[in-house]
Amino acid sequence: MTSTTDVHSVADPPRPPRRRRANWAALRPLVIRLHFYAGILIAPFLLVAAATGLLYAASFQIENVVYRHELTAPVSQTAVPLSEQVAAARRALPEGKVTAVRPAAEPGLTTRVLLDVPNLPESTQMAVFVDPGTGQVRGTLESYGSSGALPVRAWISDLHRRLHLGEPGRIYSELAASWLWVVALGGLSLWLSRRRRAGRGLRGLFTPDRAATGSRRTLSWHGSVGLWALLGLLFLSATGLTWSKYAGENIDELRTRFGWATPSINTDLGEHAGHAGHAGHATSGGQAGATPDVGVDQIMRAAAAWRLSGPLEVVLPAEPGSAYVVKEIRKTFPTRLDQIAFDPATGRVVGELRFADYPLAAKLTRWGIDAHMGLLFGLANQIVLAAIAAGLITLIALGYRMWWRRRPTRGFGRPYPRGGWRGLHWGLLVPLALLTSVIGYYVPLMGISLAAFLVIDVLLGLRARSAR
């Protein structure tokens, strides 16, 4: 005797996943439309970001060539004390206040002494380059940011980030980073769906169809190049947003809320500050007669005893009651970013921060930013960045070529129909709208530009209806 369950299992065969296919069939026109608008209107920003990023990938080699005299020195079997090198830098720029010292990391390189000098741009210091073998100054240059970018690399970096337009210029790069991941993932979904519809599956997914001609050939190259560049584009988008102006602030707020912020070492001596204000000899890079100071030479010996290894940066006490901080500044993998704080009066350790103790999110952020800048894996990192930038330029050129060949004025009609959202089931439309709202809140330039796209689309639709 057949049970009721058995009857139903025979009479009602398993339902094929039509809803998934139907949802994608309804969603696909919307994705095409969004990809089209982003490609036409955002691609110019992406093109500028890619071209300037390609230039920045080569900026380290350019910097080493342009400033070879300042960055290098004859190899010497002896070295003058670091305190004498700092004194030489102070004599070269008596109006400056020494803030940090980067001793020569290896033979043949110079020591870099950083000084605060009046009337310099924000985040910029003067760097005095000293031959560690003779104590002679080999030159002075402006140094920008924690990476110590010299003028030519700083100029290229500012071109990439802000187009030399100041804070308003950051909008361009943030807009590009905000949309890059959307364009990349939208293109991926369209490329995969096209392959399935053509019955080709994964066959030849990463290679263009050489038998195709015309627009199909261009599309084939566009899809293949985009697939190869996909992970790199997503990575650049995510890391670019971390130090953007508006989205970056929201990301920092989330990291702080969840305890993922990058920790900092405490330089306040607290109860150890009782020596401050007493007479004593001058700091090795500071002002005479201020506070007792063991000097940078003893601080360097203490740092070596605590197994800190080069390249190093010694940050001098900013004010009475604060400590020396010796930092490892090796950003190439494996990263060395440990920090030790020392009492300037005694040379005793008063604080320690090891990179191994960073939260995982802080480590990933550090590695991501350094990889974005081409620092994490050195020359190999810079070559990969250059390849991704060249790939993005190629994608944009191919995309515009497809649009130009199939533009409506040539009689091809409108391949990007309006109103694609009307075909979506409310069960998909509502979550999609909520997700878009959340992303638009945390990535505001994307939200604002998407709203602008919708307004433009509606106005064009009304105009076309009025013309009909």
Image (cartoon, helix red, strand yellow):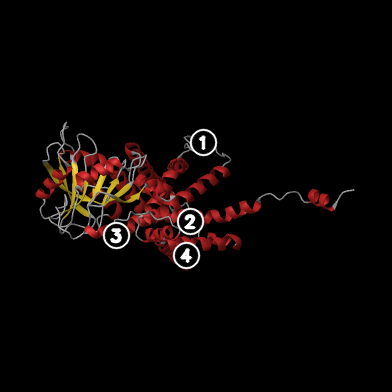
Residue 250 location (% of width, % of height): 40, 61
Cα distance between the residues tagged 1 and 3: 69 Å
Element type where label 4 sits in the image = helix
Q: Nearer the viewer, mark 3 or mark 2?
A: 3
The residue that label 4 is drawn on is 461
Q: Nearer the viewer, mark 1 or mark 3?
A: 3
Query: Relative to the observer, which residue lies in front, 429 or 29?
Result: 429
Q: Amino acid at mark 2?
A: Arg
Residue 242 location (% of width, % of height): 38, 54
Q: Are marks 1 and 3 in contact (CB under 8 Å)?
A: no
Image quadrant assignment for residue 275: bottom left
Q: Residue at x 42, y 64 (%)?
A: 456
The residue that label 1 is drawn on is 204
The residue that label 3 is drawn on is 271
Q: From the viewer's perspective, is 221 left or right of 389?
A: right
Element type where label 3 sits in the image = helix
Cα distance between the residues tagged 4 and 2: 13 Å
Q: Amino acid at mark 3?
A: Glu
Q: Amino acid at mark 1?
A: Gly
The residue that label 2 is drawn on is 33
Q: Amino acid at mark 4?
A: Gly
- Mark 2 Cα within 10 Å, few/some/many (few <14, many 20+)? some
Q: Nearer the viewer, mark 4 or mark 1?
A: 1
Asked whether residue 404 appears in the rendered view, the answer is no
Asked whether residue 133 appears in the rendered view, the answer is yes
Q: Earlier in the sequence, mark 1 or mark 3?
A: 1
Q: Residue at x 47, y 42 (%)?
A: 216
